[in-house]
Amino acid sequence: MKYDHLIKRPFEIVARRPYLWLLGFLAGTATAFNVPNGGTNYGHRGTSATYEGPSWAVLQNIWNQNGKWILGILAVFVVLCIVMFVLGCIATGGIIHAAVEHDDDHEYTLGKAWRAGYETGWRIAGLRLLTFLLTILPGLLIGTLVLAAVAGAMDSAAAAAVGFGLVAAAALPVSIAFWFLLGVAFQLAKRIIVLEDGHVAESLSTGFRMIFSHFKEIGLGWLILVAVSIGVGIAIAVLTFVVAIPGVAIGFGGWAVGGVTGAIVAGSFAAVFILGILVVASAAYSAYSSVYWTLLFRSVRGLPAPAPRGAIIPAA
């Protein structure tokens, strides 16, 4: 394992090929499920002058007047999430194929990458959904145990409450370890699906086996990427600060020339410019991270399988 090459090679591949940034951006947004959560705020009973929030009649009136717009916005939002998810699944396979081709110094284009990613897009989607389900299961278990402990305490069943609480406390670190391993296995399973034509559940299972059979190599590779991510995060924060200074100056300039209207117009242009730079930087790093995982996967796959425990190694 040449870790210095593993760090530099993805940068060499990504820096000169901006189409990988687009694929990295789409692949990174594939798991962005933004499900709106509604909460209920209960007002405290007080005097008649105390504001307790809008009444049911007011809310119903708002819905009657704007129901079509609300439904339309929600429908557009849901469709946009589905479209981004599908495009991201296709882009995931495309950027994995592109990383392999460019690592072998072959010519490759966005069209070729997109066609290659389309072939495995639905399996990548299935892997994402399976991983999502496996992610929420430990959370549901811990939440159930906590609720049981609270219910036991409210019913004066101290022994049951303490028992459920201890089990929940023990399950938490186990769940965290599982989530960590699942995240790494998910990265490996995507490469197994795309590069080795694996099936969804089988690929995820193989990803877990790879972790345990080459724990040192994969663990060190993951730690290196974490260190790189911290460095990139600091760089992006500095870039945001540097870019924000002229943006604020532009906003003040617009205010000096055109008052509030000028400040709004100039500030809007500056905000779009700053946001564009940050999106491009994030997309480039997403592409780097994907290529890094692909090269790490290829390196680990090229290692000899570890000898079974207790096996006799023949002498040279």
Image (tube, rainbow, N blue to C red):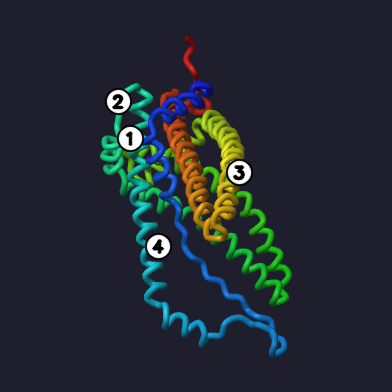
Question: In terms of sequence position, does the residue under pointer 1 or pointer 3 come before the other?
Answer: 1
> Which amino acid type is marked by label 3?
Ile
Choose between 217 and 62: the one closer to the eye: 62
Question: In terms of sequence position, does the residue under pointer 3 or pointer 4 come before the other?
Answer: 4
Mark 4 closeness class: few <14, some 14–19, many ≥20 residues within 10 Å: some
Mark 3 closeness class: few <14, some 14–19, many ≥20 residues within 10 Å: few
Residue at the spot 67% in from the left edge and 56% down from the top edge: 169
The residue under label 4 is: 77
Question: In terms of sequence position, does the residue under pointer 2 or pointer 1 come before the other?
Answer: 2
* Location of residue 275 with respect to 101 vertically, above or below: below
Distance Cα–Cα, label 1 vs label 4: 35 Å
The answer to whether residue 237 of the structure is visible from this angle is yes
The residue under label 2 is: 107
Q: Nearer the viewer, mark 1 or mark 3?
A: 3
Q: Nearer the viewer, mark 3 or mark 4?
A: 3
Give SS at disc 2. loop
Cβ atoms at labels 3 and 2 below 8 Å apart: no
Where is residue 102? Give x, y as percent: 36, 26
Q: Nearer the viewer, mark 1 or mark 4?
A: 4
Q: Nearer the viewer, mark 3 or mark 2?
A: 3
> Which amino acid type is marked by label 4?
Phe
Distance Cα–Cα, label 1 vs label 3: 48 Å
Distance Cα–Cα, label 4 vs label 2: 37 Å
> Which amino acid type is marked by label 1?
Glu
> Which amino acid type is marked by label 2?
Glu
The residue under label 1 is: 196
Cβ atoms at labels 1 and 3 below 8 Å apart: no
Q: Of the numbered discs in the image, which one, if any, rests on residue 245?
A: 3
Cβ atoms at labels 2 and 1 below 8 Å apart: no
